[in-house]
Image: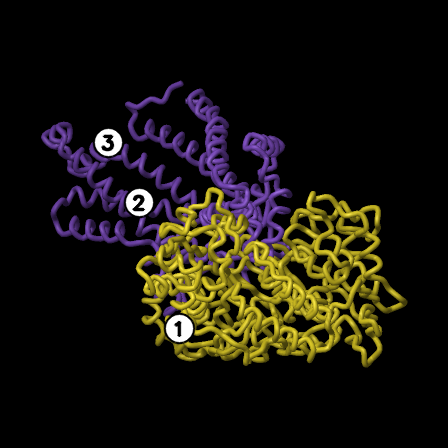
Amino acid sequence: MLKFCLKRLAFLPLVMFGVTFLLFFCLQFLSPEMRASLYIKDPRQLSQLEAVIEKYGLRKPMPVQYAIWLKQVVRGDLGYSETAKMPVAEAIRAFFPATFELTLLTFFPILIVGVFFGVLSAVYKDRLVDHITRFVAITGYSLPSFVLGLVLLMVFYGRLHWFPPGRYTLETDMLVHLDSFRHYTGLLTLDCLLNREGGAFVDVVKHMILPACTLLYISVALLLRITRSSMLEELSKDYVRTARAKGLPERVVIRKHALANALIPVVTLSSLLFIGLLGGVVITETVFDFPGIGRWGVQAAQQLDVPGVLGSTMLAAFLFVMANLISDMLYAVVDPRIRVGG
Amino acid sequence: MLRPILVVALALGALSSTALAALPVKNPDAYTYLTISDADSLDPAYSYDTASHMVILNVYEPLFQFDRGSTEKLIPLIAEKVPSRENGLISADGRTYTIPVRKGVKFHDGTPMTVEDVKWSLLRFLLLDRAAGPSSLLLEPLLGYASTRGEDGKILPNVWQDANKAVSTQGDKLIVRLPRPYAPILTILASWSPVLSKSWAVKNGDWDGTEATWQKYNNPSKETSPFFERANGTGPFKLERWDRKTKEFILTRNDQYWRAPAKIKNVVIKGVNEFGTRKLMLQAGDADAIYADRPLLTQLQGIPGVAIIDDLPTLEMNPVVFFTYRINAIGNSFLGSGQLDGNGIPADFFSDKDVRKAFAYSFDYKGFINDVMRGKGTQATGAIPKSLPGHNPNGRKYALDKKKAEEHFRKAWGGKLWEQGFKFTMTFNSGNLPRQTVCQILKRNIEGLNPKFKIDVRAVEWPTFLDAYKSSKLPIFVMGWNADYPDPHNFAFPLLHSKGDYPTTQKFKNPEFDRLVEEGNAQTNLAKRKTIYAKLQDLAFEEAPQLYIVDAVRYRTQRDWVKGWFHNPIFPDSPYGSYFYTISKE
């Protein structure tokens, strides 16, 4: 297992090199003037366009520009993101924990709800519970996240004043920036607890409820449908019939036999879902004014912030490799017949 | 991506508009403004964007300030007096300004401000001169040239000497010497002379004020400046924090301010891109004022406890239609065939005055104001907005007149144009609705005159637009201009002088325009200036190098518990942004 993990991790630098080189190569199809638009936002600055191109070396050949960037990376400098207004490494440290917290808050409920109702729906196929579950899943799957997000915001913030948008209130903002507040983990909820700031913890969680609910509803539908179809397939197989014929209780047949096998595609989907959430959920972050990694990544791409785009891409590649590794390892846990090897 | 969000937000807006009764004052100690702008740097010598300058306006102080809403009358701030010929602080030749510096002013760190800080700050503003930065605004009047670097990027030989000749001290007085009279110099200083603490800066690694080191700080990267995210000014508010993660500024009241302290204790300026979220926060009382464009006004009307203040004058000329006199034809698909053969246009298509006039008579100015500006604003009569001296409200202006348009089209290109027809592509930067509408109005009206006239309208992303603009590939482009300082020269030069930003790209050069622009700038007598600018305006009508469409007005949305706000169109992000010193919540 260790050998397998090390071998997969050894590919990581290669993946990152490939992704960044490809991206750099594609960006060279844009003229220096286009890439300089990152620094020229106003007609008043247009007369200085050539000076900007010169300053940032945008006319240098692509391999030279890539070599300069790579040299910086080797030195531990990922460059400066104009959209984040901070170095790329700092931007990742700033934006990723918020997305990570939101992912943690969302992912496990998605798993539990998705698998539970997927199984329930399969077991009670064509019964009322199945119809209701499928209806909820279809609406969740087809509902754009910005519609759901804005409706939730309208009701639970606009009318009821329960869950405000943003990351925290001004009071919490002041508190978490005090010198006495220690950032142990970078995860705000956990840090609030570790600092024994219960009020701030509640405030931070309150700000995460609506984006989490939006993501939960949108994402759970897919998992639910995959679990249901996978479970239906397993339930129709011979070994399930045999188990039932042997007189095993239905609870045991479903839990011990069918579910274990049905979970394999669920694990794959879950890992992709996890990467998707970690990579940031742009619309949800925009609607709820949540300062996550997705919003930054998209802004960087829209504004041709090359270091920002490269940084967020490297992070995405890293997450993808790691999530795949974890899901491969989970296969072995879910199904003992599968063995990972070097 | 954001358009569908907006549509849904607008649709859902009706749901909640009646939801709230008037609230009691929420967060009475904090004024919260929600914007869409993203600040660039808090270094006053580096930043050239409205979001940064909104903070700078409240944290730092310049020599002078405009008297509340006035764009002409100045009051002293860091200076003790505003120089004038009457008080003898402007020399007879109009080139030397003596500025007594106020005593008893302290920086936020408690250190006293001195005339040396003022001198250092001005020199730093001149010498830092980052590419695409604001230094040219003072370099031009104080040194006589717009950049410290030549076209090869190397520093010019006499910059240090020239800068020190222009800015010096005499006891407690700052002396500013100009190479030639420059009428708007005081208004430029009122916006672009924020005073920084030299000792604090040096302690934090910034320029020490010597000749030996200044070049090291020329054209810097923004993050190297100690002023990038920190501030130590003398203004009514201290910068508590710029949280770039949450796009939020927190300012706290400067209780040691040399005037009476501000009324509000904290100010929060926060970037929230999504309109629906901004609106909900205003409605809930978590925001006291928000940024919202004209088309969104109807969504904000009728919210209990929210006031709309409309018809606020602006210092902008936007949108403007620019004709390119010599279009760069190399690899240019916007020109079609590149010939006057009905499938394209030649590169000098718009050098024919009749073509330009025909376009001018083809635009529906009133319709644009009614539909896009919701009936607000008036038709522009020239490049200078109506809130500035030098604007002539009685000047000639174009109106939609299809008969006249046809006459000019028939005369253009010796009659060949009408016979052959033309085809070209008109572009606008995507997402800009007013500019898109301008293009569509021109297309519809011109194509209606002759079936052989074809105009394609295409939206392009800003980077693509910028690329084509800079290389003069756009036959027509629609852009705008916002004031750096409230003076007619700030519009006359960039729009009409051959060395101005737009004429350079338009390849438009007319010696009479240049002469009038330069004459207007050197003339310090206001009445005479007005006469010069009126002539310029008339000439611009006759030559039609550009089409001016609307003298726009804006509106502001704020909770009705906000008191003490006043409008000055020169304030950054005005009228949404504010000078917070006078604001309170009651």
Shown colour of chain A? purple
The local secondary structure at tag 1 comes to loop
Q: Which residue is mark 3?
A: A261
How many marks are shown on the rendered structure?
Answer: 3
The amino acid type found where label 2 is placed reads Ile
Which residue ends up furthest to the front in the rendered image? B414
Mark 3 or mark 2, earlier in chain? 2
**SS at badge 2:** helix
Residue A179 location (% of width, % of height): 64, 54
Q: Which chain is yellow?
A: B
Question: Split into 4 quadrants, where in the image is the N terminus of chain A?
Answer: top left
Mark 1–mark 3 distance (CA, rounded to whole Å): 77 Å
Q: Nearer the viewer, residue A313 or A245?
A: A313
Residue B256 visible here: no
Which disc, if any, is residue A112?
A: 2
Residue A247 in the image: above or below residue B21: above
Tell me what residue is drawn at x 38 percent, y 53 percent. B423
Residue B401, disc: 1
Q: Is residue B333 left or right of residue B448?
A: right
- Tell me the kind of residue under disc 1: Asp
Q: Camera-side residue: A146 or A39?
A: A39
Position of residue B302 relative to residue B459, above or below, is: below
Is any part of residue B159 visible from this angle? yes
Name the chain letter of the residue that bears numbered label 2.
Answer: A
Disc 3 versus disc 2: distance between alpha carbons?
A: 17 Å
* B9 sits to left or right of B577: left
